[in-house]
Amino acid sequence: MSAIPLLKVNDVSKFYGSRIGCRNVSFELYPGEVLAVVGESGSGKTTLLSCLSTRLMPTSGIVEYHMRDGQYRDLARMSEAERRFLMRTDWGFVHQNPADGLRMTVSAGANVGERLMAVGDRHYGNIRASASDWLRRVEIEEDRIDDQPRAFSGGMRQRLQIARNLVTSPRLVFMDEPTGGLDVSVQARLLDLLRGLVHDLGLAAIIVTHDLAVARLLSHRMMVMKDGAVIEQGLTDRVLDDPREPYTQLLVSSILQV
Amino acid sequence: MNDLAAYNFAYLDEQTKRMIRRAILKAIAIPGYQVPFASREMPMPYGWGTGGVQVTASILGPDDVLKVIDQGADDTTNAVSIRAFFQKVANVAVTTKTKEATIIQTRHRIPEEPLREGQTLVYQVPIPEPLRFLEPRETETRKMHALEEYGLMHVKLYEDIARNGHIATTYAYPVKVEDRYVMDPSPTPKFDNPKMHMSEALQLFGAGREKRIYAVPPYTQVVSLDFEDHPFEVQKFDKPCALCGAENVYLDEVVLDDKGGRMFVCSDTDHCEDRRAHGHAGALLARPTQESQEAAE
């Protein structure tokens, strides 16, 4: 891991009118680091993720990103063209519902190839080759390359969405409940895959989840949110094995033991 | 005076023409950009060329010579009725000869005869947005045009190749104008796309229902999108025109009988007639004397 943070978040708050989305969140994310944001529904996890990924403008606070040219840029001050370019090249966003992140009416190959074409790749053979390579890496049979995601199961759709995001070798991936709505065996397989990819590619990732098992398996560090504020953060193992805040203790003790 | 309602020259009132001319000027200034305009109701249904008719009405002057074609033909319903409309409301001279026309309103074809400086080609456009079937949100497609995010257009071409082995889009084939805007050339066959490139004539596009006008000024680059390993190609025909023997023109298939007989003839009727008048004959007219004798008998 490099000593220069990839993302610097300083005192970010988001208010919906008088209601609090999230408040006074500060942290730094380093290249190759996986950060999990956990907390119950309504605790501001998704709001925070939207503020970081420029899908929402924070009410106050600064989010800075370390660009490939070595400069830090304030995301709120970038032009929309730059932001959108960043989002489809250097970043990925994995939605909870794959239908939000995929084009359901075009083939799996085109879904994966879209980002390549968006950055100017104009060679059909090369685009198809990398699409087929990525399908293999996310364990989708290559003969499904011309099928539409409508014909895929939930787990396959989610894996396709991941391939689509990773094809431009992003450095930072945002994930909103990536395993939500999948049954446990599919979840396990997806987590295994994600862990491998994150490790092999040296991705930094911010994963929003309410599932502590997901956080335990994937993340190096975690933040616990309650009522819009971060109440505890630290190394994942430390937080889960030795929770300090009463709420975190409650959360950890609520995990069902089988 | 009679009590029939009177209308202005070329049907539209002067304020409306002014508004449309402004939109046209803006469209010419930004080649390929879709300019919104306050499309009027016309005395014909949407889909019959209300956009093209409004553009023509706004640029038509008393000295203009108008030609109207529909799928290349001067004598089909749409062409005949629009021509009659302008004869009635503007009393302008009309022609079927491409060379003589100053304004040509067209549906789905560009004449085979190369257009020259001073001529204006007015297209009737059903759906002006080339990204529409890929991205249904207008707010999003506008943003994509503004930010030049055209990767999605290639997704469509990719799908074509993945399904059919080649780019199977044959009409409304997307083009990039002057290296900036991606534009729908209206449902002309892609055979006509190369004619738009560096054309000497002014090309105006009117979409009445969708309320958009766009333009390609003379001598403007118009490049059809493609992949490096699947370059853009126009349709090719095995045989020449059955009536005039023309090659390298766009042909229509015409069924002759109920026994599978068919012929391929020029879709551009004026071009075909002109060639025949100059003594060219295709396979079906190879023995004109004998045939006319049979007809006389």
Image (spheres, coloured by chain):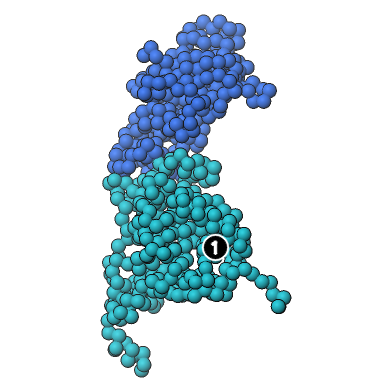
| Residue at the (62%, 68%) spot, across then down | B8
Q: In this structure image, what is the colour of chain B?
A: cyan
Q: Amino acid at mark 1?
A: Ser
Residue B251: x, y in percent?
Answer: 35, 68
Q: Is residue A138 visible?
A: no
Where is residue B291, by image quadrant?
bottom left
- From the image, tell me which residue sits under label 1: B58
Residue B147: x, y in percent?
Answer: 46, 39
Foreground pick, B22 / A162: B22
Q: In this structure image, what is the colour of chain A?
A: blue
| Residue at the (50%, 14%) spot, across then down | A27
User: Is B193 above or below relative to B289?
Assistant: above
Where the N terminus of chain A falls, by quadrant? top left
Foreground pick, A7 / A177: A7
Residue B209: x, y in percent?
Answer: 56, 57
Residue most toward the right? B3
Label 1 crowd (10 A; few <14 / some 14-19 / many >=20): many
User: Is B23 above or below relative to A184?
Assistant: below
Where is residue A59, by image quadrant?
top right
Describe the element under mark 1 as helix, strand or loop: helix
User: Is B134 above or below relative to B185?
Assistant: above
| Residue at the (55%, 75%) spot, across then down | B91
Q: Is residue B95 visible?
A: yes
